[in-house]
Image (spheres, helix red, strand yellow):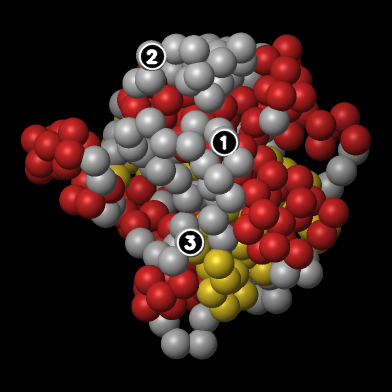
Amino acid sequence: MTWRAADIPDLSGRIAVVTGTNSGLGKVTAGRLAARGAHVIHAVRDLAKGRAAAGEGADVRRLDLADLRVVREFAASVESFDLLINNAGVMWPPLTRTRDGFELQFGANHLGHFALTALLWPRRAVRARVVTVSSFLHRQGHLDLADPNWERRRYSPEGAYAQSKFANIVFASELDRRIQAAGISAASLSVHPGYARTNLLTSGPTGLRSLGRILSPVFARPAAAGALPTLFAATAPDAVSGTFVGPAIADLFGGPAVLTPAPGTTSPELGAALWTLS
């Protein structure tokens, strides 16, 4: 039977940190968790947009994953968490550097979430879960650990995005291995939403907007459907640490299912190397 948002258990008393809740998948994820009783900390770059999306009385805090000083300030404001949803991301920008000098997509999509997870880790509750949102486009990527910030290679927005989403799964898998080795009661899962209809299709880079106009009528599914893999990984009692969850059919359609990610993403050697580099 297909898992649905109605299957989310009661989350009363649980604290969920969700990055990028001002629109799209993050907004839906935060709303579903709050509807089931969780206290959601909305981690957003733009406070005005975040508050408008979250509604009156919501706990909205500033987080800029492209600025590690702000990441540290945000983490210091969080006393504890049960769920950490590493959802926010940037897609296909021109070559841009973060405040700390990293290529923007690798810096925000991977390094920012790596830092956030590390800083919050000592404040986790028992049986805490970390869910890191990747993309089906990770299947087009690979990790160049010698030049992750595109300083010597010719920059490709699509290639940099795919690399960052590949890194998301490598990180989530390595975190799971470390959890298991330490015997900790926690979980780390990675997910992807399929091809979801979000604001990236209308407000993203020109090439992405053009692609969205062509493919959306046929392939894109609502953000509510795209958020289901994240919600399953974060809340389902039978979600297993170390797994990769996405749409059951062709990476595009159907309810949440455990999938096999791209070769190399679960490599212990690559995971350890990325961890050390990060």
Residue 45's mark? 3
Q: Is residue 92 above or below residue 39?
A: above
- Where's residue 190, x and y in %? 56, 37
2 and 1 marks in contact (CB < 8 Å): no
Residue 154's mark? 2
The Cα atoms of the two marked residues, 3 and 1, are separated by 18 Å
Query: Given this view, does label 3 or label 1 mark the residue nearer the observer?
Result: 1
The residue lying toward the viewer, choosing from 107 and 6, is 107
**Rendered residue at 48%/20% (across/down):** 150
- Counting residues from the N terminus, which is met first, the one under dot 3 or under dot 2? 3
The residue lying toward the viewer, choosing from 224 and 144, is 144
**Rendered residue at 52%/81% (across/down):** 58
- Counting residues from the N terminus, which is met first, the one under dot 3 or under dot 1? 3
Q: Is residue 136 above or below residue 56?
A: above
Residue 101's mark? 1
Give the class, few, some or many, for how many residues have Cα within 10 Å of label 3's Cα (few <14, many ≥20): many
Q: Could you tell me if residue 29 is visible in this image?
A: no
**Rendered residue at 69%/30% (across/down):** 278
The Cα atoms of the two marked residues, 2 and 1, are separated by 17 Å
Residue 216's mark? none
> Circle 2 — which element?
loop
